[in-house]
Image (cartoon, coloured by chain):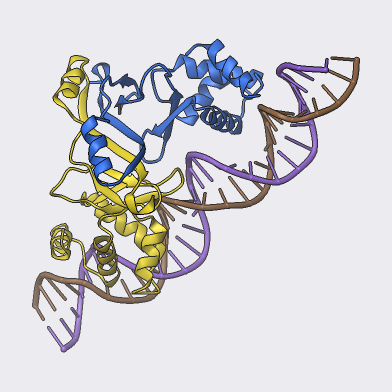
Chain colours: A blue, B yellow, C brown, D purple
Amino acid sequence: MTYEDLVEKIKKAGGRVTGQRKIILQQLIKHQNKLQSVDELLYACQQYNSAINLTTIYRNLEFLDGLQLIYKTNIDRATSGYKLINLETHHHYMICSSCGKLLPIEHCPMSDDLIKAAEKEGFTISGHSMEVYGTCQSCS
Amino acid sequence: MTYEDLVEKIKKAGGRVTGQRKIILQQLIKHQNKLQSVDELLYACQQYNSAINLTTIYRNLEFLDGLQLIYKTNIDRATSGYKLINLETHHHYMICSSCGKLLPIEHCPMSDDLIKAAEKEGFTISGHSMEVYGTCQSCS
DNA sequence: ACCTTATTGCAAATGAATTGCAATAAGGAG
DNA sequence: CTCCTTATTGCAATTCATTTGCAATAAGGT
């Protein structure tokens, strides 16, 4: 997902490419392979615009989420983590509990067996999540 | 998981079996096959003791969680859902978005392939989560 | 250069979850 | 059964992430 791709999607949705939004996009791209807390993202953005506001971060994440461009999960019980979605790939990751780095998982758990089992019980699947937790190489 | 099992574990951990805790345990057992929000659990408990307090619910859930007896996840973005853990089985469920009912998933996504792939990248697995969302038979 | 309106910043509000503290009661000891 | 220790409870106050109202700002099309 390049910066230009993002800008195109935003404009297509009637959004504007403001100075703050540019910085936020750049920081999300820069940290595409890890989860960022809101505070981390704010701090990263403030390196480029010290006046950027926390509310603006929240609103941009919400805006991008509305465009289905954001992957959100919990880093721990108290902290939410965000990153850009990789449109090319399915979204399952191994999450390093120490540094937040994400390693994509090739294998999607939605097997035919599982889908059949759901159908058998009359359960209509609308989505799923899967995450593996642990410690990455450089942290252990 | 029977009431007696729970009481035994609690006593072994130095906990006391108070009137409020009894009611909470009973309600958790009664709704063992669905997620309950804190408010739902409070309401259910208040049918038996109208004076029972929200803080007590939170503290008991925390206490039981410390004994690894509670499965916690999000019902939606704003609401946490709790249920007793089934010690016998692995904990993966299909969650009905409408009524919160849980259907256990036999198949655990931690395949040998996945474990090998993690090892290959030097990632040490400490845990994982998987949930399937959708609508159950009676809700659709 | 001029509008329209999306976006921002700030302060205030919301709401789930937590905490301090005094009062209560479980349950073991005598 | 009575006493004592301390786990637990209730209440009010607090915390903290997230959201919201509103006036000011600025994108970007005309």
> Which quadrant would residue B90 be assigned to in this image?
top left
Depicted A91 relative to depicted A78: above or below: above
Q: Residue, x 27% and y 41% (percent of image)?
A: A119
Depicted B114 relative to depicted C17: above or below: above
Question: x, y percentage for residue A12?
Answer: 62, 20
Is residue A52 shown left or right of residue B84? right
In-front residue for pair A128/A47 = A128
In-front residue for pair B112/A73 = B112
In-front residue for pair B82/A139 = B82
> Which quadrant would residue A15 be assigned to in this image?
top right
Question: x, y percentage for residue A131?
Answer: 30, 31
Question: x, y percentage for residue A73?
Answer: 39, 33
Q: Residue, x 29% and y 43% (percent of image)?
A: B94
Q: Residue, x 56% and y 10% (percent of image)?
A: A4
Q: Residue, x 54% and y 31% (percent of image)?
A: A66
Taking the image as drawn, is residue B38 in sight? Answer: yes
In-front residue for pair A67/A96 = A67
Question: x, y percentage for residue B43?
Answer: 40, 66
